[in-house]
Amino acid sequence: MSYNDFVTMRDFSRKRNRGLKNYAIVIAGLFVVALGIIVIQNQATSQGSTMGDVQIGTLAGLQTTDAPWNAGVDHLRERLTTISLPALTAEGTALHTHQHLDIFIHGRPIAVPSGIGVNESAGFISPIHVHDTTNVIHVESPLIQKFTLGQFFDVWGVRFDQNAIGGYVADATSTLKIYVNGELFSGNPRTIELTAHEEIAITFGTSQEQIPIPATYLFSPEL
């Protein structure tokens, strides 16, 4: 082998080694990026969405039984802390809207109890609350911000997600459906924004148990 041939082979070997090293660096970099994405996704799952959503199972006093459900006042303060809502000493005035909620389980209407989000003995109230038995939700906040149906159920302390409400879990025969102003909602119902004079209907049951879905609600003039 001539000296020139030796030099050529040596240079080729060096270039190949550099190429392999660069390739290894690229692969390692891609692995780190992928690992970072996984970590971020896991953190998002554990911490909740940017809409104030949380891991439902972490809520204190969560009611996962069949209806009827109580107002969930006993662990209200703990849940407000978990979902990052304030325990107000008075109703807020910057944002004031009302929604009507109908719940039908196997074709039967379920009462929404009064006092959700209100702890009179401790002297505090949630920005999302219920005063009476008309199924009207009150959003009275000192800040103008977005509130969701998921937050309402978290304040209430009743399990609610895409597949379950309380102790009722969707299966091969029974389904959970949510309607907003008479229209079937597709997607995560916890993300439904609570807007002024909204009619929300939640149904759980078989296809034979479905009932006419209300599209509107006649709110009293003061609301």
Image (cartoon, helix red, strand yellow):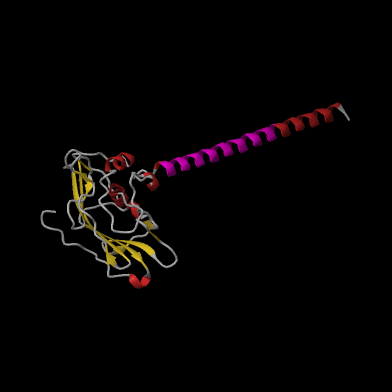
Which image quadrant: the C terminus?
A: bottom left
User: Residue 37 location in percent, x, y?
Assistant: 50, 41
Q: Is residue 154 left or right of residue 2?
A: left
- Of the 4 image quadrants, the one containing the N terminus is top right
User: Residue sitting at 18 percent across and 38 percent down?
Assistant: 89
Residue 200 on the magenta span: no
Say whether residue 163 is left or right of residue 117.
Answer: right
Residue 109 spot, x, y in % from top left? 26, 64
Q: Is residue 110 left or right of residue 14?
A: left
Question: Which residue occupies the foreground of this view, 49 or 21?
Answer: 49
Quarter of image, res 78: top left
The residues colored magenta run: 18-46
The image shows residue 192 at horizontal and vertical percentages of 31, 53
- Residue at image location 62% in from the left, 38% down from the top: 27
> In the rendered view, would you say 177 is above or below 128?
below
* Rendered image quadrant of residue 170: bottom left
Q: Position of residue 97 (x, y in %)?
A: 19, 50
In the current view of this chain or complex, which residue is farthest to the bottom?
Answer: 208
The prevailing secondary structure element of the residues shown in magenta is helix
In this rendered view, identify the residue nearer to me: 86 or 119.
Answer: 119
Check the image and report above or below for 119 versus 101: above
Left or right? Give the position of 222 relative to 174.
left
Name the residue at 17% across, 51% down: 131
